[in-house]
Amino acid sequence: MSIFKTSIPLFVVFALIFVSCSSTESFDTKVQKIDLVAVGPLFEGVNTAVVDFDFQEVLPEGKMKSQLDEVVLKSVKLFIDTVTLPLPNSFTLSLASPNTSMKECGFLNDPKLSNQGKFEIRLAKEQDFLPEILQDKKQTLVVDFNLTEDWLDDYFIKAELDWEVKLKN
Amino acid sequence: MKFKSLVFLYAFFPLFVLGQEDDEINYNDFEYADEETKTYASPKINGLSPNRFINVSWDAQTPYKAEFSDRTGYLEGADWQVNDSANVNYTGGLRLNANIPIVSRNNIVWQLGANYMNTSFNVDDPAGAFEPILSELKRRDLRTSGLFTTVFKPLNDKQFLIFQGQADYNGNYTFSNFHTLGLTKYSAAFLWGKRPNDRLQWAVGASRTYRVGELNYVPIVLYNWTSKKEKWGTEILFPAKAHGKYWINKSSLIMFGYELEGGSYHLSGLSFNGNSLELRRGEIRPRIEWNRKLIGFFWLNAQLGSRLNYSFNLDELNEGKEFFRGFFGKQEYGALSSLGTSFYGLIGISFVSL
Amino acid sequence: MRKVKSLVFVFVGLLMLTSMVGDSSEEGDKLIGVWEPSNKKVKVKIDKISGKYYGKIVWLREPIDPETGKPKTDKNNPDESLKSVPLKGYRLLKDFVYSGDNEWTEGTIYDPQNGSTYSCVIKLKDENTLDIRGYIGVKTFGRTDVWKRLVMKKKK
C-alpha cells in the first residue's frame, strides 16, 4: 500500500515533466525570399539553379532551428522574367544539406505564362524529411528547369517559400 | 539559333559564334570517350516478383489420411489394395532459404544459396505393418538441407544461359545423427534463352531433378512475361512451377498457379528386406500467393492452397544405391502409398530486391 | 579554322561542365561529365552541388510514355504526389562524396523502373569507365553496372 502512496505523487511529477517537455509551439514564418541563378551558357534540356541558405534566418529571433519538430512547406512560388528569359517546360524543386540526402519537394509541368511571371509549384505530400534537412548546418535549394532551347546567358529565378513550423520548447 | 542568343554570342563569345553558329548542344550528339558500352541481357524483366535473398517461412497442412499397400512390390501404376492407413493430424514446419550473390555484374551473375526445410508429422496411433514407418515419421521430422548455385550468363543484349546446380541432403536425420554424405541427391538445370524486350524472357533447357520424389530427367521451359501496364503477367518454369500474377499496386502482388514440391528422403533406422528405404515424396500445390511489402526491402508472403499427393511411395535401395526409374522404368516399388488431399497455408518474411 | 572550332567547342564544353562546380581542380571532380549505363536507355550528367556529386537524366532513348503519349514521368515514385515529376532531369544519383582512391561513396541510386532507392558506391575504373554498384544494406546484396563516359562529338 505504501508503494502506491509514494508512486502516485511521483507519477504526477513525471507526468507534469513529460507534458512540459513535450509541448510545442506552431507558427508560420515570414515568407522566405531567395534569388537563384544558373550561370550560362545553358543548353536545351534540364539545367540547374542552386543557392545555399541557412534556415535559421527564417526563424524569429530567439528561436533555434535545433528546436524544429515538424515543418510544412505550404507553398513555393517561382518568379521569372518571362519577357527576357525563355519559359521552361518544367520545374523540379529539391532541398539538400551536407549531412542528409537530397529530396524532391515539388514540381511543375507545362507552366503557363502569367502576367507576373509567377509559377506555383505543386508540392510533395510527404514532407517528413524536412526537419532533418532544415536542422543541418546549411541548406541548399535546387531548382531544375527544362529549357526547350539554348540560352547562352545567366538565368535568374526568384523563389518565395512559405513555411509552417512547429518548435519544441 | 534564336536572335537573342545570337546577340549574346556576338557580344561575349565572338570566337564561338565564328566557329559554331550552326551548332546546338544536344545530348544526341554525344559519343563514347573511348569504347562503346556493351549491353547485356538483364536477368530480370519489368514487373517480376521480388527476388528473395533471404526467406523464413512456416508451412502447415490440414489433417488427411495416409494409406499404404502391402510390401509385395508394385510397378508404377499398378492396382493396389489399402493394407494400412493412418490419420495424419498435422504436417508442416520451418523453411529457410538464402540466395546470396557472389558475383553480380551486368555481364555475369553468380549466386550461392542454401535451403533448409523441416517437416513434422503428427500421426494418430500408428499401427499395423507400417507402424515402424509411421512411428518413425512421428518421432523424427523429415529434413532437407541443400546447397545450390546459379549462374546467369548473358551472351549479348538478348540471349542468355542459366545453369543451376543443387545438392540436397534429405532424410529423417537429426543434427546429432547425420546420414552418410553418400546419400546426397544432386540436381541440375541448364537453359538457353532470350530476352526480346523488358517485359519478356523465355528459355528452354533440360534438368535432372528430384522435384516430385524420384530422380528424373525432364525438359524445362521458362516463360516470364509482364503486360504493358505491368499489372498482369506470368512466371513459369514448367514443369516445376507456373504462376499468373497481378500487381495490385507496387507494394502488393497476387500470384496464382502451382508448384511441384518434394524430394527423395532416406529413412534411417528402417529397412525392407535388408535394403535401405527411400521415401519418394512429391506434391502438387495449386495455390494463391500474396506478396506484400512490409517496410523497405522486407516483404511478407502468404500462400493458401491445396496439397495434392503425387507420390509418397517407398523404394528399396540395394546397398543404398540410387537408381533411375524415370517414366518408363520397370523397377518395383517397395510399397505404394497415397495421401489424402489437404489444404495448406504458408507464411513467410523475405529480404528481397526488386 | 577547324582547329579554332574544336578549341572553342572544348572551351564551351568545359564552361558547361563547370558552371555549377565550385573548384573543378578537386580530385573527385573526375566524376563530372556525361555517362551512359550499359542498358543505353538514358544519359546521365553528373555534376557537383554544394560539395556532393549528383547525376541527373539528361537524355532518354524513349522520352515519350507510350501509355500517355506524353513525356515520361516518375510514375513509380513512392510518393503519390510526385508521380508526375518529369523523368528527364530526374536525379538518379544523389549525395556522393569522394572518399579517395577513385571511389565515391555515401550516395544512392534510384531505379525509376520500380521506384526503389538503393545505396550506391561508384568506382572510376579508368578515365572513361565507372563501376556503379547499387546495393541493399551491405554491398553483397547488390549489382554492378558499367557506365561509359560520353563526350561531345568532335567536329570534322
Image (cartoon, helix red, strand yellow):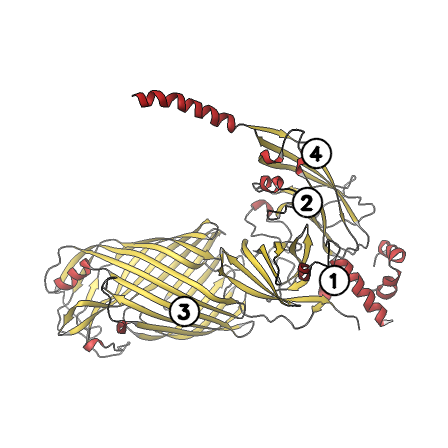
* Residue at the limit of the structure toward the left, as seen here: B128
For residue B6, side relative to residue B29 (left or right): right
Tag 4: residue type?
Answer: Val
- Residue A112 image point, x, y percent: 73, 45
For residue B257, side relative to residue B338 (left or right): right
Tell us which disc is closer to us: 3 or 1. 3
Write down the residue under mark 3: B149
For label 4, the SS is loop
Tag 1: residue type?
Answer: Asn
Q: Chain of mark 2?
A: A
For label 2, the SS is strand
Image mark for residue A31? 4
- Name which residue lies at 63% across and 45% down: A97
Tag 2: residue type?
Answer: Leu
- Name which residue lies at 35% across and 63% down: B115
Residue at mark 3 to residue at mark 1: CA–CA distance = 46 Å
- Residue C14 image point, x, y percent: 76, 61
Badge 3, how many Cα within 10 Å: few under 14, some, many 20+? Answer: some
Is label 3 in contact with label 1 (beta carbons under 8 Å)? no
Tell us which disc is closer to us: 2 or 1. 2
- Residue B62 image point, x, y percent: 25, 53
Image mark for residue A141? 2
Tag 3: residue type?
Answer: Thr
Residue at mark 3 to residue at mark 2: CA–CA distance = 48 Å
